[in-house]
Image (spheres, helix red, strand yellow):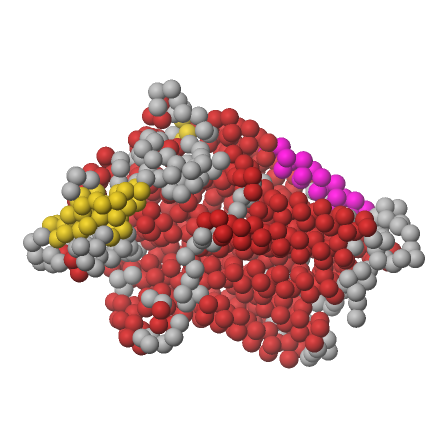
């Protein structure tokens, strides 16, 4: 029967950091780029929409500025970042991410084409 | 001539559309079973559990990308989400905007590492992965419990959505109407079953039997292949719906101009009288009735007595009132006794074009800034934290598949979510008064635009899109719950030496039993579909996001940190829903300081995991070397 703390070994000192594998380091680099991208798009959408989505034009809503027939805050605050996000994702996945060999399964399982 | 001759179809399709929808559905189900049969044949000669629950980790580009995307686009995407767009307008574009970056966050955060760690651990399920990563059975058991608990709520919501779509799909089809009549008589007097309506009961049973059988028979690979087909149906369906809707509404510019004139409707009560040949008994929920002050009201309940006030929806926009006048029941007049204007946006022209959007009960409007920000976090991180997505990330063949899939999923989400906002803001203009049936706006608009375009048969394909979305989610969740019971409870704790044959039989049996239990509970479904979905996905995200992120990226994390972290996430979200229930007297979340519970849960979970882990000795060196080493 294990205990909740069964993975901690009181007699061993930490050795984390020295022996990290290359594939782990690469995955971690990619994670930080992903986090940075999320912050950028979150900020873009929040600032753009918070500044303009709640505004009532002086002449009433019939004078709301539009782009491509949609309210302009939607296009500039959501549509445009959405397009840029797609372009960034394509660059990230096809240009920045590195292929990493995946380990063999710990259990024997045949691999098949889906 | 009685009133019923004038009643507009309550909902659903014309006879031609209904028949074509039935044919579409039959063809669709036929292919689903063919796929399940093929998947079942592939199981032969392979490790049963690995193939049945994880497809032998061999998914290619189309299979991985579309099973991921189709599972994400659940019944909520095609039922609850359209209902919200219709009810609150363009502010939903901001509400859903987090999806622009979901493919990167969800797949970028987990996919590569979870696949690596899953292979090293030989794990087939998420609880199993956590158990082996920490060498700690408490972690695995807690994860199994949480998956089964929250996923069951998710299943309920999806079963309900599937039955409702099907009811709309089959409405008016003679054989269906006859069967409904027979069931109405047969169910009388049966406890619990007798309380559900006959049409819902029939549709629920047909839907559930189809999904449960093909999932139990074909396993993960059948689910993945049907997801591919369902994903394609969704994308094509939304594109066709977008084109037809924009064409009917006269273009986006025209839709925006109309929305600028629109004011939210009012709910209320009225006394209804009928003169001439008609009778009160012929009036149905959904009928339009002229009001004594020249307006138009829609019945929100069945009228039983002309002296009893009945719930109504009142239109307040002049062009909407004009547009439904020809649908008014002749001779029927409603005298308004009570009006309930929206708490936010009442009488406010153009509120549907801007944030926060009109809201019936929230005085701050539908989407204050803090809540909008919360949802950007919610879709990304709650989505990333779903075990049903994580398990798919353990199944792709190699990282080349992953990289190309991230691009494909981002294109898929872009084709679905933003166009849906355009479609259902336009639907406001085309179909007034749908607030009383908001959850059914998707099939209704499909029927409406195809009818007007002279292609009613196309409605079958369009309605297949949400149906596909629901099916692709139900099958995934069903399998996830079954894997939790069979692999994580039975094989791990009760019988580690179970034979392949025994595991096969047990997997089939558990899938059937879980499905049956879900159907039994949802016979009388809870009313809040979208709320239930947000609760379940929030609970799973709260319980698994931070534990899994840190398990994959922080070697210093301990099993106790993971255990208490998961419990903290679940406890936080349950507490904030409990407070929400106390506050509003109905099931719903409590947004502390205007921020969604998922955000509080993520913060609390992260703090607990880090604190508990740092308070302990570092984890076993061998364990760290195994999962993070060279």
Q: Residue at x 55, y 32 (%)?
A: A46
State which quarter of the image contains the N terminus of chain B: bottom left
Magenta segment includes A28: yes
Which quadrant of the figure has residue B123? bottom right
Q: Which residues are magenta?
A: A21-41
Give me the residue at 91% from left, 55% from top.
A12
Q: Position of residue A1 (x, y in %)?
A: 79, 71
Height in image: B137 above or below B65? below
Q: Provide the major secondary structure of the magenta segment.
A: helix
Residue B184 in sight in this render: yes
The answer to whether B378 appears left or right of B118 in the picture is: left
Query: Is residue B406 shown to the viewer in this render?
Result: no
Q: Residue at x 59, y 42 (%)?
A: B377
Residue B86 position (above or below residue B251): below
Q: Position of residue A84 (x, y in %)?
A: 56, 33
Between B303 and A56, the residue placed more toward the observer is B303
Between A18 and B394, the one nearer to me in the picture: A18
Q: Is residue A2 magenta?
A: no
> Is B206 placed above or below A7 here?
below
Counting from the top left corner in percent of width and height, residue B399 is at 69, 50
The answer to whether A57 appears left or right of B374 in the picture is: left
């Amino acid at each position: 029967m294990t205990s909740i703390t069964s993975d901690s070994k009181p007699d061993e000192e930490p050795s984390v950091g020295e022996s990290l594998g290359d594939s782990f380091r690469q995955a971690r680099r990619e994670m930080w780029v992903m986090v940075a991208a999320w912050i950028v798009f979150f900020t873009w959408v929040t600032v753009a929409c918070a500044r303009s989505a709640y505004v009532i034009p002086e002449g009433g809503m019939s004078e709301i500025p539009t782009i491509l027939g949609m309210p302009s805050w939607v296009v500039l605050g959501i549509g445009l970042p959405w397009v840029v996000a797609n372009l960034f994702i394509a660059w990230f996945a096809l240009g920045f991410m590195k292929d990493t060999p995946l380990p063999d399964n710990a259990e024997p399982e045949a691999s098949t084409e889906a | 001539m009685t009133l019923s001759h004038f009643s507009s179809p309550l909902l659903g399709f014309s006879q031609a559309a209904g028949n074509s929808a039935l044919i579409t559905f039959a063809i669709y189900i036929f292919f689903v079973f063919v796929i399940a049969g093929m998947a079942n044949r592939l199981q032969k000669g392979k490790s049963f559990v690995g193939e049945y629950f994880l497809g032998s980790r061999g998914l290619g580009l189309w299979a991985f990308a579309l099973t991921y995307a189709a599972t994400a686009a659940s019944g909520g995407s095609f039922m609850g989400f359209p209902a919200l767009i219709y009810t609150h307008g363009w502010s939903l574009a901001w509400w859903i905007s987090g999806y622009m970056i979901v493919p990167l966050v969800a797949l970028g955060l987990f996919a590569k590492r979870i696949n690596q760690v899953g292979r090293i651990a030989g794990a087939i399920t998420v609880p199993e992965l956590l158990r082996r990563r920490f060498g700690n059975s408490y972690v695995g058991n807690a994860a199994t419990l949480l998956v089964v608990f929250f996923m069951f709520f998710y299943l309920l919501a999806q079963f309900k959505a599937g039955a409702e779509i099907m009811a709309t799909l089959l409405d008016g089809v003679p054989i269906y109407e006859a069967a409904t009549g027979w069931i109405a008589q047969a169910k009388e007097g049966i406890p619990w079953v007798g309380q559900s309506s006959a049409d819902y009961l029939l549709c629920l049973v047909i839907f559930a039997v189809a999904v449960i059988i093909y999932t139990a028979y074909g396993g993960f690979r059948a689910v993945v292949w049907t997801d591919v087909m369902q994903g394609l149906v969704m994308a094509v369906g939304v594109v066709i719906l977008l084109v037809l809707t924009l064409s009917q509404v006269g273009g986006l510019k025209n839709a925006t101009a109309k929305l600028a004139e629109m004011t939210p409707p009012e709910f209320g009560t009225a006394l209804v009288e009928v003169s001439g040949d008609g009778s009160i008994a012929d009036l149905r929920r959904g009928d339009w009735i002229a009001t004594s002050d020249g307006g138009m009201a829609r019945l929100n309940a069945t009228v039983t007595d002309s002296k009893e006030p009945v719930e109504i929806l009142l239109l307040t926009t002049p062009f909407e009132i004009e547009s439904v006048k020809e649908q008014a029941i002749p001779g029927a007049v409603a005298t308004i006794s009570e009006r309930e204007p929206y708490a936010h946006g009442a009488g406010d022209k153009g509120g549907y074009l801007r944030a926060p959007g009109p809201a019936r009960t929230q005085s701050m409007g539908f989407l204050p800034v803090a809540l909008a920000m919360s949802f950007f976090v919610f879709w990304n991180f709650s989505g990333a934290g779903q075990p049903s997505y994580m398990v798919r990330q353990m199944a792709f063949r190699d990282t080349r598949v992953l990289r190309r899939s991230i691009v494909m999923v981002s294109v898929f989400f872009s084709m679905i979510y933003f166009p849906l906002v355009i479609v259902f803001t336009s639907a406001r203009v085309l179909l007034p008064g749908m607030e009383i049936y908001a959850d059914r706006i998707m099939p209704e608009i499909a029927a409406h635009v195809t009818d007007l375009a002279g292609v009613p048969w196309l409605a079958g394909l369009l309605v297949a899109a949400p149906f596909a979305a629901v099916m692709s989610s139900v099958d995934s969740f069903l399998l996830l719950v079954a894997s939790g019971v069979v692999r994580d409870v039975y094989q791990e704790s009760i019988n580690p030496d179970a034979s392949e044959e025994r595991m096969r039989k047990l997997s089939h049996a558990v899938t059937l039993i879980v499905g049956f239990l879900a159907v039994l509970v949802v016979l009388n479904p809870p009313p809040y579909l979208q709320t239930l979905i947000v609760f379940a996905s929030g609970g799973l995200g709260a319980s698994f996001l931070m534990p899994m992120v840190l398990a994959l990226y922080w070697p210093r994390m301990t099993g106790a940190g993971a255990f208490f972290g998961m419990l903290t996430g679940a406890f936080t979200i349950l507490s904030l829903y409990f407070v929400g229930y106390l506050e509003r007297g109905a099931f719903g979340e409590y947004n502390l300081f205007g921020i969604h519970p998922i955000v509080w849960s993520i913060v609390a979970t992260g703090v607990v995991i880090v604190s508990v882990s740092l308070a302990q000795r570092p984890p076993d060196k061998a364990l760290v070397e195994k999962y993070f080493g060279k």
